[in-house]
Amino acid sequence: MNGFFEHQYLTYKKNHIKNLLALAKADGFVHAKEQKMLFKIGKRYGLKERQVQELIDNDEKYTVIVPDNFHDKMNILFDLMLMVWADGVVEKKEIAFCESLVKKFGMKKGVVNWLLDEVFEALTASLRPRGGQVLKFMGDGMLATFPFVDETRDATCRHAIDAALEAMHNLDRLNGARCEAGKPIAQVDLALHLGEVLYGNVGAADRLDFTVIGPAVNEVARIETLCEPLGRKVLVSADLAAAAVGDGCRLEPLGRHTLRGVRETREIFALDLN
């Protein structure tokens, strides 16, 4: 009997990924960032990358499998929002797919905009009054900058740390309310770094993307990948930690770590969220 239930649970987990793949394959191609997000969600459900990759490589055209309970429907919808943001671009056909899905779930299509807005508003509300600029959302993360324009370098770095702290507290409150209501919660990691960047429209003529590029952008992305193995929600580079004068008491040194694609190890700090 145990084997039966284990098989049923494995089928449930794979069906969840298949529903996300139905969205990812809507344009006929699973993008690299979408694939990375599928691996991350699969890991949360106890699936190995090999199992998720097998589903991705399958030529089968996945159709939506409608769950029989509200909780599972909301889990799918929340993860769909992460998939929508995975490549940093929200396309009309993706929204249309999600709206058709909620209709199949017996819900109003306004649920899609509510889910898209709620979590990311919790993260961005703390940035705006401190001069932070959100450039794009990417899956369960975002790319934001704090330009050195109106204030000193030290003050700007302190604002970035304050914004990260408030954002995580906002998310905790949101997750607490969602948990009490039996709804899925958001798991978000943040990384803060200091460096020079180039900004502007990047891409091809038919698809320009306003963003920032440069080694500092690559490094902060690599630092964020350390959040899970280090068991921390917000990591800070040594460069930003040194510039944020007066915030040493909130930063815990975690030693030097290797960043993929970066020659020398980097000293990393964790932000105390208490």
Image: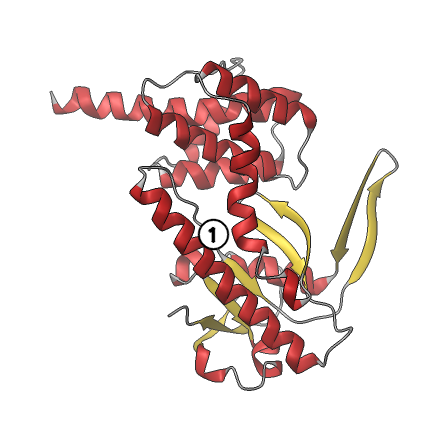
Residue 243 in the image: above or below residue 274: below
Q: Which residue is identified by label 1? A: 188
Query: Can you tell which quarter of the image residue 215 is in?
Result: bottom right
**Which residue type carries mark 1?**
Val
Residue at 40%, 32% (x, y): give it: 75
Is residue 259 shown left or right of residue 42? right
Residue 133 in the image: above or below residue 268: above
Give SS at disc 1.
Answer: loop
Residue at 16%, 23% (x, y): give it: 3
Is residue 59 shown left or right of residue 40? right
| Place of residue 92 in the rendered image (x, y in percent of width and height, measured from the top left) | 69, 26
Q: Nearer the viewer, residue 255 or 64?
A: 64
Residue at 40%, 58% (x, y): give it: 229
Coloration of the structure image: secondary structure
- Considering every residue shown, the one lying at the far left of the view is 1
Is residue 86 shown left or right of residue 43? right
Number of on-image labels = 1
Residue at 66%, 71% (x, y): give it: 194
